[in-house]
Image: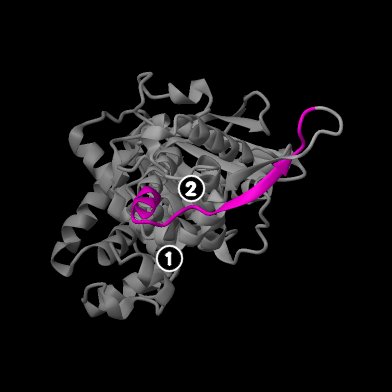
Amino acid sequence: MRSLQLQAALAEFAAQAAASLHADVLAGQEVPFELASHSGRGRGASPLYCYRPLTGAFVAERFPALRRLDGYARAAKLLEDFDGLDRDLISTGGDPTVSHGARGRCDAALLALLQDVFDEQTDFDRSKIGQHPERLDRALERLDGSAFAAAGEVTLVATLHGLTITSQELALTRGLLIAQPGAIRGAPEQALCAGARGEDDHLLVVFSAEDSDPRAAIAQGRDVVRELLRALRLFGDGRIALGALAWTRIGSAPWDTIALGTGGRPHGMLVVSAEQEDELRAFCNLVSRRAPHANEVAWALRRFELGCERASEYEGISDHLMALRVLLGAPSELEPDGSPDGRLAARLAALCATPDLRGALAERTLKAIALERHAIAGTAVERASGLAIARELSNHLRALLRDVVCGHLSSDLASLADELLLSGVELGEESLGDDREASEVLNVAV
């Protein structure tokens, strides 16, 4: 699949480079020549000589200046996330181990692209280079083909619903990106029209990896997109969902379908602006590294996700209350025989409301518990007021889980809540763990 955003950025950089090199020629800087020979026709014919422009050397000498063009930064940034970058360097005769760092490899690839496009040109006037568009297309086709040059390259494409990004593509890490359906060329046709109404009201998640065992790579891709969904739900407001199916292929073989094993439908839309992209990248990376396993917080996190996947937000109340009971429902040393529901409501209010608003939040939590009982009995009637309570409960749970995973809050939330209730103070800076890395990614938002 080709990234149209990368294609446009490379084309713009090549156009700016042509204008810059043409200006150098007009200023009196000439392309050097060498005397080359080739055999004449017929046996024993004398060799023929001609002058061949050393355009590649001319472009390479001026590449440091070309790096200062406006189009360079965008092209290089997108190229850094291109999975076939190293294979493209090998295909053009480069050695990816020689260049130091991703930016060095990008520079080598960009220089090779310009040398291909301007091969044997002497004045770089695009109006006089009849083959300029064709040369650029060939260079882009070669670059595009490098992404799937390996027979073991596995690609997985899933659909994401309930999220909007303002950019055409959002690369989260090497091998994983979110993109607008129209920004990727070569994606499976079913994924492009998988919106809720058959329209482009969804995004694509594209995972790619190379593995000697393609089945293991596909399983890894399924896990990666699920982890991404978890991070997005914690980052936003839990309204996001994956499509039930994903599409996979090995190399350039036909697309196949697999089940992702997720459900639910989005409620509303989370918008990620261009200014929030770096924050989202850092947050997804942090959640991937710090997501708990095999403990009470992990169990509560899974219950949170199950609640997000319910078809009805009313059905999710029970999942979210179960998660809160695990996090906040432990018996209190001060009141071991107290009402479990009252204890849960008081602790949630202590952590998620200022002292003057704790009573109101505790009352709404008790109403959520009453709604759960009606849902279990089959007597629940969906009303706007009940949906608002269900969403508020989900948001409080999400905020607590997010801050525990990021290290802002201790996992012993029950004890922290009891301390706040006894002291009568508000959850603030003095209550947070000393985790500098996490605090740089996300501020406390409970």
Residue 364 to residue 250: above or below: below
Question: Residue drawn 42% across and 45% down?
Answer: 123
Residue 161 visible in the picture: no
The percent position of residue 262, horizontal first and vertical second, equals 51, 35
Toward the viewer: 220 or 391? 220
Residue 171 visible in the picture: yes
SS state under label 2: helix
Question: Residue drawn 40% across and 61% down?
Answer: 65
Q: Quarter holding the N terminus? A: top right
- How far is the residue under mark 2 from the one under mark 1? 15 Å
Question: Residue drawn 68% across and 34% down?
Answer: 251
Q: Quadrant of residue 223?
A: top right
Identify the mark at residue 24; answer none if there is no mark. none
**Amino acid under label 2?**
Leu
Furthest toward the right, the residue is: 43
SS state under label 1: helix
Q: Label 1 crowding class (10 Å Cα cut-off): few <14, some 14-19, many 20+? A: many
Q: Quarter holding the C terminus? A: bottom left
Q: Tell me the residue that label 1 is attached to.
A: 406
Residue range highlighted in magenta: 21-41
Residue 238 to residue 443: above or below: above
The percent position of residue 158, horizontal first and vertical second, equals 51, 34
**Amino acid under label 1?**
Cys
- Sequence-wise first label, 2 or 1: 2
Q: Label 2 crowding class (10 Å Cα cut-off): few <14, some 14-19, many 20+? A: many
The percent position of residue 205, horizontal first and vertical second, equals 48, 39
Of circles 2 and 1, the one toward us is 2
Side of 16 where 100 appears, left or right: right
Q: Tell me the residue that label 2 is attached to.
A: 228
Toward the viewer: 73 or 221? 73
